[in-house]
Amino acid sequence: MTSRKKTILWIIAIILVAVIGYAVYYFTSIYNGLQGLQKTGEASPFKNVTPVEAKVPEPPKWEGTEPVNILLMGVDARGISEGEIPRSDSMMVASLDPVKKRIHLFSILRDTYTDIPEHGKDRINTAITHGPNTAMKAVGDLLGIPIQYYVYTDFQGFIKLVDAVGGVDFYVEKDMYYPSAADKHEYDIDLKKGMQHLDGKTALQYVRFRHDATSDFSRTERQRAFLKAVAAKMQSTTSIMKLPDILEEVSPYIDTNLSVNDMWKLATVGYKSQMAGSEQIPPMKLLKERTIGGAAVLTVSSESKLKDYIQDVFNKPATVPVSSDGTAGSGTTNTESQDATSGKSGSTGSSD
């Protein structure tokens, strides 16, 4: 063998070793990062509520072939004492069907008045204060579907996630302004209408804004739209390569009952699936505003009709989006349903 051929073989060998070494590092980092998302013992934000939650059944096991439903909860932990669990500022359910390869997103109005297992009736956003199993059971009973998993984070976790993926290019549909002297203006909202690049802090302003005529109705719609944009950004090649760094950034601010094995399976399902739609719960046709105990809440006119509505959403035939030139396309934008909230009633009076 000539000296030139030996040199080429050595170069190829070095490159292969480097690639294998990086792959081992990459997947080990991802595994460790995913493992760190599940908090136990003293690291769990729910360490003080576990005994209270003992009477609530454990969530059903996901076998990997039937639809899986994940409760996503964002909380506002400002001013909360150590060990205290804040109410949910936002609640969504992501439903993934591994057979149909479709994803549905439901956002639950936080003032929805419903049964909280072992705690009587209250607003749905209080369920998490009694622990994640209680929150999953309350939401599952309301929607008529099993909730297998939860993901829990606060403002800082959301900011870190958006920054970790490099921000998101997003269309802000109108000027948004709301100063907050109580927070020493740390969380002031001041956005201008138009397409712009939102980093973690400005994205938080967008998904929190509710100071307009349609209040929480339009806010939950914005949250669903922005979450879809973040998911799309996460599927990009750049974000996938940065996944170990992303996990390292967000891990301290997230808690979940998902195992690493379940995360791998869900990631595969999610990557192969298409967003089939997003809905507000309760829908306007089943929603009633009432005053209970001196507080304004939202009630469901018929629980059975709500469950039927959820099943109708799941069974709706898949549609192929059509672009402006009349050809079939894919994907959606956050402007598709911005007019859907027009004419809706205003705030139910709960605090921000």
Image (spheres, rainbow, N blue to C red):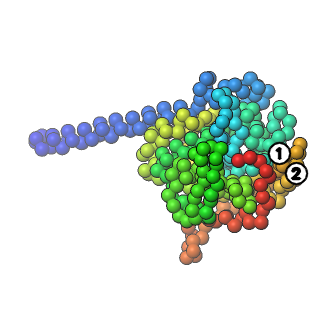
Q: Which x, y percent locates residue 249?
A: 49, 39
How many residues crowd mark 2 within 10 Å: few (<14), some (14–19), many (20+)? some
The CA distance from mark 2 to mark 1 is 9 Å
**133 over 181 or under it: above or below:** above
Q: Residue at x 88, y 45 (%)?
A: 294
Determine whether, in the image, residue 12 is placed left or right of residue 142.
left
Q: Residue at x 75, y 50 (%)?
A: 109
Q: In which quadrant will I find the N terminus?
A: top left
* Nearer the observer, 200 or 53: 200
Q: Which x, y percent locates residue 66?
A: 67, 44
Q: Which x, y percent locates residue 245?
A: 45, 40
Please tell me the numbered disc located at residue 113. 1
**259 over 320 or under it: above or below:** above
Q: Amino acid at mark 2?
A: Arg
Q: Are the residues at dot 2 and dot 1 in contact (C-beta closer than 8 Å)?
A: yes
**227 over 115 or under it: above or below:** below
Is residue 159 visible in the rendered image? The answer is yes
Determine whether, in the image, residue 120 is placed left or right of residue 212.
right
- For label 2, the SS is strand
Is residue 235 visible in the rendered image? The answer is no
Q: Which residue is mark 2?
A: 290
Q: Residue at x 57, y 62 (%)?
A: 192
Q: Amino acid at mark 1?
A: Tyr
**164 over 327 or under it: above or below:** above
* Nearer the observer, 144 or 97: 144
Q: Which x, y percent locates residue 199?
A: 51, 51
Q: Residue at x 72, y 65 (%)?
A: 340
